[in-house]
Amino acid sequence: MQLKLDIEYNKSCMAGHSKWKQIKHKKAANDQQRAKIFSKISKLITSAVIEGGGFSDPNINVKLRLAIEKAKAANMPKDNITRAIEKGSGPDRVNLKEVIYEGFGPHGVALVIHATSDNTTRTVNEVRTVIDKEGGKLGVQGSVAYLFKISHSPELEYVPVFNMEISDKAVSDQVIRLLENLEELDDVQQVFTNAVFPE
């Protein structure tokens, strides 16, 4: 019903107004997505400085250098990068840390979730809620990690030892929705899975 109303509304609008409305919606969506990406990268930068013992020189701190490279690739403003570094080394230093969660999605697919958080209680609750909603279960440390090889070149990556093929479209859609919802969480940096989806 709502779709029909939207279509009728668009038909009744002048072409110029309708196009401007679409551009505004698209820009808002892009700006929102951009802000979310910048927020995630900022946490990575701050965390890299903290874990590097407060060293803010990317020539010394390799993890920081990789995070800055990721920021530049995303066209993140230099001021944002500087602020993120200061949060990890300045007087108002925040308490961020990287955490790894393991779990199972629909059909028993393995999940490894890499997050950066200043409140792990909040983060684990958010992750658990998303997984539970799609019929999965948050596991304990070591419950699925053995199903992956850990690579650090150039950044953290969990590579499946073997893949789990999902041929059923309904299950495939459910797993993809779960992965997308997990990556939408502010504290989640990356989600790794052994699920393989049909073309």
Image (cartoon, rainbow, N blue to C red):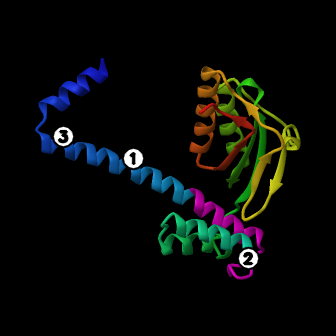
The percent coordinates of residue 187 (x first, y second) are 63, 50
Q: Answer yes or no: do the residues labelled 3 and 2 have beta carbons within 8 Å?
A: no
Q: Return the residue at label 1.
A: 29
29 or 167, nearer to the observer: 167
Mark 2 residue element: loop
Q: Return the residue at label 2.
A: 61
Which callout, 1 or 2, points at the residue further toward the start of the chain? Answer: 1
Q: Return the residue at label 3.
A: 18
Q: Which amino acid does label 1 sit on?
A: Ala
Q: Is residue 103 left or right of residue 69?
A: right
Which callout, 3 or 1, points at the residue further toward the start of the chain? Answer: 3
Q: Does the magenta stretch include residue 39?
A: no
Q: What residue type is labelled 2?
A: Asn
How far separated are the C-alphas under marks 3 and 2?
50 Å
Which quarter of the rendered picture does the N terminus lie within? Answer: top left
How far separated are the C-alphas under marks 3 and 1?
17 Å
187 or 177, nearer to the observer: 177
Q: Image point 35% across, 49% down: which residue?
A: 28
185 or 168, nearer to the observer: 168
Q: What residue type is labelled 3?
A: Ser
Q: What stretch is highlighted in magenta?
A: 40-61
Above or below, comparing residue 136 to residue 55 in the picture: above
